[in-house]
Image (tube, rainbow, N blue to C red):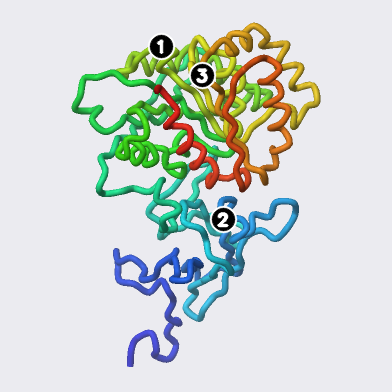
Amino acid sequence: MPAFAQEGAAPRTCRDTAPFQPMDYRSVEPLADGRVTFRLCAPNARAVRVISNDLDPWVPAGFGGGERGLAMVRDTAGLWSATTALPVPADTYRYNFEIDGAKVPDPMASTFSRERTGVNSTFEMPGEAGAFQSYRADVPHGIVSRVEYASTALGAVREAYVYTPPGYMAGTGRYPVLYLVHGAGDSADSWSSVGHANYIADNLLAAGEAEAMIIVMPFGHTPQGSAPNMLVNTAFGEDLTTDLVPFIDATFRTLPDADHRAMAGLSMGGAHTLNFGVTRPDLFGEVGVFSMGLGFDNPDAIASYTRRNADALARRAASTQPVYYAMGRDDFLYASAAPTLALFEANGIPYDYNESDGGHTWINWRRYLHDFLPRLFR
């Protein structure tokens, strides 16, 4: 009789594996019909849910007070499982488990993405619709490096992630630079770990649809107390212009002028771009704003922005490069798009507007980047 079946023996659980052997289950399994099954071994848990802001509505995010997460069911071995009711579109998603109220990354995951605080597990749902942001074995790949630099503006050590295109390491040439900023809930690694900016650039380059460039992905937050307003964070602007841009130009083989330097960002990073990119045509020749506008939180925001930046807006209007502006029709910031575009028009600033389906999600932001990169440095 097997030991686990003997009288008085502890019941067998999903954790019964030999020492140093992995548990034998798939924590994320795409099904043939497009739905996704999640699993977690947690024999002692009382309640487990899959949680994700990226997977809403397939896994409800709970915005507006609705149900949050996807409830999981426990089997006799302590293995919890849940399957989405609907097919999940091909793309990359962040998720975690909530175990008895505690948010926990998937212990069986192999890819992760940092938030401003904390960590998410990630998985990629395969399919043609998401292929533009997927790793492809048949194309050359650039390299993403993590760098640290001393910020005199903030009196702190800062980090950034830097994508260098295929051929950079073996070559001697100089490259234009895009500064690409994340949103309020994210970190410096988000544009590579979940945004897949490096794969998007690799695939566009392989297709001959974009110029080879360096992409710098800075940390969009500053030390606590330095930024009373997250969306008008002058401390970030000072660090960017005083420390990060000079550090990148001194460390990498850049083309250090405004014609070969661009800035873009999503959500909070879009606010940073409005405040420190649009207003600095002498530093950033081309700019892109994803899912962010002026006036959604303050009726005086448009007038205040114009007063603060009147001369800078006149200089931006003299630029031949349009501002790239993208917004989803279901984005909770959608109402801020019209007044922001009206501000551009009132100040004679040319723009290209990409209005898409969908909301305030990485599904949109990857596609905005895919649309934006081919416009740069042409």
Residue 55 - label: 2
Circle 2 packing at 10 Å, graded few (<14), some (14-19), many (20+), is: many
Q: Is residue 280 above or below residue 339?
A: above
Q: Which mark is residue 321?
A: 3
What's the residue at 59%, 69% (across, down)?
85
In which quarter of the view is residue 109 placed? bottom left
The number of numbered discs placed on residues in the rendered structure image is 3
C-alpha separation, residue under disc 1 versus residue under disc 3:
15 Å
Looking at the image, residue 297 lies above or below residue 29: above
Q: Residue at x 40, y 20 (%)?
A: 149
Nearer to me, 251 or 178: 178
Q: Residue furthest bottom?
A: 1
At x 67% / y 26%, what residue is drawn? 341
**Mark 3 residue element:** loop
The quadrant the N terminus occupies is: bottom left
Q: Position of residue 369 (x, y in %)?
A: 48, 36
Q: Amino acid at mark 3?
A: Gln
Q: Please tell me which residue lies in front, 221 or 337.
A: 337
Disc 3 crowd, CA 10 A, few/some/many (<14, 14-19, 20+): many
In space, the residues marked 2 and 3 are separated at their CA atoms by 35 Å
Q: Which residue is mark 1?
A: 257
